[in-house]
Image: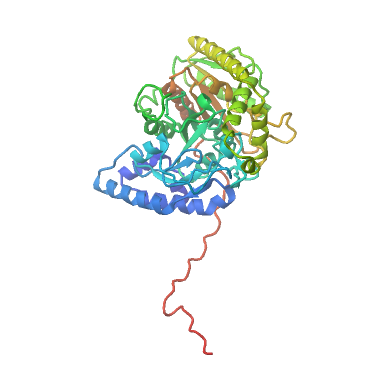
Amino acid sequence: MSEDICYLTGVELLDAYRAKRLSPVEVTKAVLARIDGLNPQLNAFCHRDDAAALKAAAESEARWQRGEPAGLLDGVPTSIKDLLLTKGWPTMRGSKTVDRWQKWEEDAPCVARLREQNAILIGKTTTPELGWKGVTDNPLTGVTRNPWNVALTPGGSSGGASAAVAAGLGPLAIGTDGGGSIRMPCGFTGLAGLKPTFGRVPAYPASYFGTLAHVGPMTRTVADSALLMSAIARPDARDPLQLPPDVRDFGEGLDDGIAGLRVAYSPDLGFARVDAEVAALCAAAARVFAEELGARLEEAAPGFDNPQETFRTLWYGSAAAMFRSITAQKRRQADPGLLAIVEEGERLSAADFVIAERERASLGILMARFHERFDILVTPQLPITAFTAGQEVPDGWWSDRWFTWSPFTYPFNLTRQPAASVPCGFTGAGLPVNLQIVGPLGADALVLRAARAFERARPQHHRRPPLQMPPPKAPAQPVTKETVAPASAS
């Protein structure tokens, strides 16, 4: 029963609270117990505050009992990626270079919105150091693992968030995405997620990765992603690059379907090499848009060359800027892979950066014109499935850098477009495969609606990873006069 509670979605929990079938305290206790049992296997959480979570759950329960819930997420357990400031909790970013003992006095905008909506904050989830790569391990907390096979990576850099949600350690999580860091872990663990249009979810402090970096939801269902977006896509004066306020219910019209929508399917964007089993699952999923959902489907690529070098210049240059204030002594404590890209970034010039930004602008124009012909673009989310945990790339891979195995993600960080990840099947080895759905700038609601339409046609979220909770420990015997052994005479 406890596992069943932990696998309820956020929307289902709110319905259960409303009907008084469950209480926030009951749910929070079940989630915390499941974290106790499974986090030693997964390493999804790097910080917990059970007392604060239970206190918030009790307050939420009292509101529900009075019939006065407050906020969109009242009583729903939610986790925060450890790149995002959280008042009273350390934000270590997976790095030994960060001072744990500084004052932690601010919430990031999305965290502030979660508190306003009365979500239950259950802890911080793991990330690679400073969010630099597409898998999740770091010098501070070690290797995070995939619930579908703990020998494999859950992806990154929001890998702790994906492992947590996939394993039933809370239905909602906040992730960040600078080159695929929401969508890659969703793809490796079979979750729904959204990289919103840049600026739709305000950010503070500004990421060193600049306008590549987005904040968004990671959940088991598209409906939960829409629910979480409704809570966090709200204005915050600390972000000068946020979009004009557009407070909306992203659940409104979510189930309206996509009949008549013009859908382009690109199996490879014209340059990616895709594993045969992944390609077959994604091609079959794309046909659902036409055969069952009523969309007008056409196989078409946008027509750009692989923008890998453009992304690499911006990513490495940003990493170098991030390390300018870090001393040589502290650098020795950092991830060697991160140090390697910092050193490469330090050799780039300002002109290199300006040229990359111009190339980025050209890509954005091309995609804007492509969306004059097509409402959405559908691609595989990843060309491969999850590989060995603790490695940046699969065994025998041709490159030593993570973004070379994720060609479908970083182009749309460069263009700032909304892109959703939605499960579309499992391989013969039982590993998840996802589709990516990309829309024009500002079309976050449309992207979510298309993802929801596919999810309803091919639901995957009821399938659970093959995890086993350890046997419960015997409760500690209470100390009473009868159980305290008498002192021996001397």
Q: Residue 177: where, in percent of width, then height?
A: 52, 30
Q: At 49% from the left edge and 35% from the top edge, which residue is drawn?
A: 175
Instruction: Determine whether, in the image, residue 120 is placed left or right of residue 463.
Output: left
Q: State whether residue 387 is above or below residue 302.
A: below
Colour mode? rainbow
Q: Residue 397: where, in percent of width, then height?
A: 73, 31
Tell me if residue 459 can be seen.
no
Q: At 37% from the left edge and 42% from the top edge, which residue is drawn?
A: 119
Q: Residue 176: where, in percent of width, then height?
A: 50, 33
Instruction: Determine whether, in the image, residue 188 is placed left or right of residue 455.
Output: right
Q: State whether residue 311 is above or below residue 31.
A: above
Q: State whether residue 368 is above or below residue 13.
A: above
- Foreground: 225 or 414? 414
Tell me if residue 420 can be seen.
yes
Q: Residue 445: where, in percent of width, then height?
A: 41, 23
- Foreground: 34 or 349? 349
- Foreground: 61 or 306? 306
- Foreground: 218 or 256? 218
Q: Quadrant of residue 130?
A: top right
Instruction: Determine whether, in the image, residue 304 is placed left or right of residue 60.
Output: right
Q: Quadrant of residue 378?
A: top right
Q: Quadrant of the C terminus?
A: bottom right
Q: State whether residue 160 is above or below residue 490.
A: above
Q: At 49% from the left edge and 43% from the top edge, which residue is drawn?
A: 91
Q: How many marks?
A: 0
